[in-house]
Each structure stands twice: as C-alpha cells, then as structure tokens.
Amino acid sequence: MFLFDNLLCMLLGISFTVWFTLLLVFIIVPAVFGVSFGILSVYICTCLLFLTVLLSPSGIIAKELASLEQEMQEMRRSGSGSALGGAEFEMSDIFHFCRRGVESIVDDEVTKRFTAEELESWNLLTRSNYNFNHISTRLTVLWGLGVLIRYGILLPLRVTLAFTGVGLLVFLTSLIGLLPNGGMKSFLSEKAHLMCYRICVRALTAIITYHDSENKPKNGGICVANHTSPIDVIILSSDGCYAMVGQVHGGLMGVIQRAMVKACPHIWFERSEVKDRHLVAKRLSDHVADKTKLPILIFPEGTCINNTSVMMFKKGSFEIGCTVYPVAIKYDPRFGDAFWNSSKFGMVNYLLHMMSSWAIVCSVWYLPPMSREEGEDAVQFANRVKAAIARKGGLADLLWDGGLKRDKVKEVFKEEQQKLYSKVLVGGAEDRSRS
C-alpha cells in the first residue's frame, strides 16, 4: 500500500511537471515575447475543415422593406382602388400600422440583436443547436467526441491559463505600483499588461487578425469600438495598452481593479458618480489632456450586441473634443458565439461557454483617427463614427438605442412615426391643391 501511494504521488508529480512545462514553453513564454508557434492556426484550420466537410449549410432568406408611402399606396389600391393623392384619412391606413406592429413583434430589428447570431450550419455546440433539428447518429457520435475534447482537454488547459493570466496581472501590477511614477514604471506596466492579456487570450484559444495597425490609438485620444462581449477588452488589450473606464466593483473584480490602477491611471467611478455626466466628462477630459497617459477605451453602445449590427452610440465620449480612434471588431460565430446575453447568462456561466467553445476567432480593424468637424454636434459626430465602424466590420448600422432591451420604447420614436404619417398626408394635400 505504501509503495502504491509513492507511485501515485510520483506519477502525479511527473504529470504536473510535464503539464506546467508545456504551458511555460508553448504558451506563457511566447505570450511574454508576443510570438506564436502557429499551433493555434493549425488547430483553427483543422476545425474549419472538420465543420465544412461534415456539416452542410442552410440558406437564410431576407426580405426588403418598402417605405411607408409605398405600402399605404399599395394598400389603398388593393382596398378601395384609390391612390394616395389626398390628405383625407382613410380607415384602411390603420391596417398598415397594425401589420407593421405585428411584423415588429415577430421579427423586429432590435430584439434579435440581443440573441445569438444565426448560423448557416451547426457547429456541434448544443448552445447553438436552435434551428437544426435533424441530427443524425453520425453527428451525435461526433458531438460526443467533441464534448470529450472540449471539456476533457481544452477546458482544463484554458482554466489553468486564465488563472495564470489573472494571477500574474494582480501580482505584477501590485508590484509595479510600488515604484515611483516615471518612465520606468510606465514601461514595466505596459509590458506586464500586454503579457497578462496575451495569456488570457490564449486561455480562450483566440485567433485574432489585426488590420491597419498604423491607425492604432495613441496617447491623448479615445478609442471607441462596437461591443459584443466583455472579452472585447482582452482582444484589444492584447495588441496595445489602454486606460479602462468603468464602475468600481467588489469581490474578485474589485481586487483586479485596485491592482491595475496602482500601475496604470485607469478611470474607476463609484456607483454614486456614474450618473453624474459632468463629473464623468471632467475626469475623461483631464485624462486626455495629459498626452503621457494611455488612450481611453470606451464602448459607446453601453451594452453588448450580437455582432450583427452597431446600435446607437451614447454621445458622452464624443463631447470631450479630442481625437477619436474608431475600431471595428467582428467575430466568427462558427467556432463559438462570443456574444454575452447578460439577461440570460451570468458572468461565470458565460465564461464557461467561452472556454468550452472550439475557439474564438475575430478580426479587428483600426480605422483612421476622426475629429469633430466644424458645425457638427456630438450626436452627428457619434453617428459618423458609428457608420464608419459598421461599414468596416460588415455590420448593420442601426439608429436604435441598445438600452431598448431593458427599457420601453422612447416617446421620441413614436413621435417620428406620427410625423412621417403627417408628412405623407400634408404632401398629398399640397399635390391636390396644385392640381
């Protein structure tokens, strides 16, 4: 019995040594120097070949929307045979708004932005098996094999890397925070942040392609990006250092925040300060006025969108009057859905989904810096930046506020529809008076 215990301890010790050595040589050390052996690229190519050969795609049909005036003209012709030539209200006009209301409930362009993106083919993850019901025995066997690989091999490796990255981030930033402010402290802080974030990226098995790096954000500016997931921060911070903006938290997140701010001037707000727009604007303005401080990273949508569109940008970060560096982020959902549905999944559950996916594959585009033009207000500037991000990332540009997933529709949107209908009637009356 004594010999068996010794043998078991020796095997565990050897296993731990081999495991840690592989992590150190193939993941942690390359993350420190920002290099890659190409293992992840081979893995992604293998997954892509596997999913492409074994799973057949299914098409997605989209419809074109007609204008309000066109639909009402068609409805009047089909009903009474009269065209929209006068300003008189007709009872049939009601049916247009009734039909639009039902269509909006069934398939509105806002609500579907807060659910997982539709896939053209199943990726062998049960969380994405919503629309693929005809699963064969072969696919069931492959799914079972995938579960063993993802939860038996990949998940333990990723959890180990995640704890390593976060642990090093807290330890190193706390240590660097003891140094006096100066060039050496900034240099060490930047290197420590980059190394730890790159380890965390490897904990997600993330393959990131960065485009147009000459446009990377510079000190004294604000970096704005579309928002899909909390890991957006890790994706961007593994290629450059940023000053974070956010609310002070408790627990583990609070420990990380307190450690990070010792080494780098991040901007954390107390809960009572978050709604004070003037205080927030002043803190941001003071930060960007110092050209030695890192660019601020902000997600103006204020909530996570499912990476099919870009929704309304809050104007606060565009009132500062500094240079804005737009960044577009686009994830590939075939290997794992990065979208965080905060109303459905907690943070721990979400991270478990991320670490048990096949991989996280995304592209990042750094757009040329943009500044507020003469005569342009903050809202117009925000919309111009949003449109540029949507075009570059191949995303739909929507005017809706992402807060609609939690709040009721604002009265201003109802008034817009009322004004549009009034213009149709007034335009018809003017045409009638000319004739």
Image (cartoon, rainbow, N blue to C red):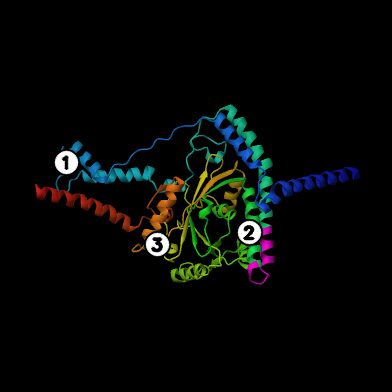
Label annotation for residue 193: 2
Judged by its main secondary structure, the magenta piece is helix
Vertical order, 391 against 297 (above or below): above
> Is 248 in front, or is 364?
364
Task: Give residue 394's position: percent from left, percent from top.
Answer: 44, 45
Amino acid residing under circle 1 = Ala
Residue drawn 56% across the image and 54% down it: 236
Task: Give residue 137's position: percent from left, percent from top.
Answer: 59, 27
Q: Are marks 2 and 3 in contact (CB under 8 Å)?
A: no
Residue drawn 21% across the image and 41% down it: 73
What range is drawn magenta here?
Answer: 168-183
Q: Secondary structure at mark 1?
A: loop
Residue drawn 56% across the image and 33% down it: 51
Q: Which residue is mark 1?
A: 83
Amino acid residing under circle 2 = His
Q: Nearer the viewer, mark 1 or mark 3?
A: 3
Give the mark nearer the N terminus: 1 vs 3: 1
Q: Residues within 10 Å of mark 2 (few under 14, many from 20)?
A: many
| Residue 175 located within the stretch drawn in magenta | yes
Q: Nearer the viewer, mark 2 or mark 1?
A: 2
Give the mark nearer the N terminus: 2 vs 1: 1
Q: Are marks 1 and 3 in contact (CB under 8 Å)?
A: no
Distance, label 2 to label 1, CA atoms, is: 66 Å
Vertical order, 277 against 307 (above or below): below
Residue farthest to the front, as pictured: 214
Task: Give residue 48's position: percent from left, percent from top.
Answer: 57, 35
Viewer can see residue 184:
yes
Q: Are marks 2 and 1 in contact (CB under 8 Å)?
A: no
| Residue 47 located within the stretch drawn in magenta | no
Q: Which residue is mark 3?
A: 372
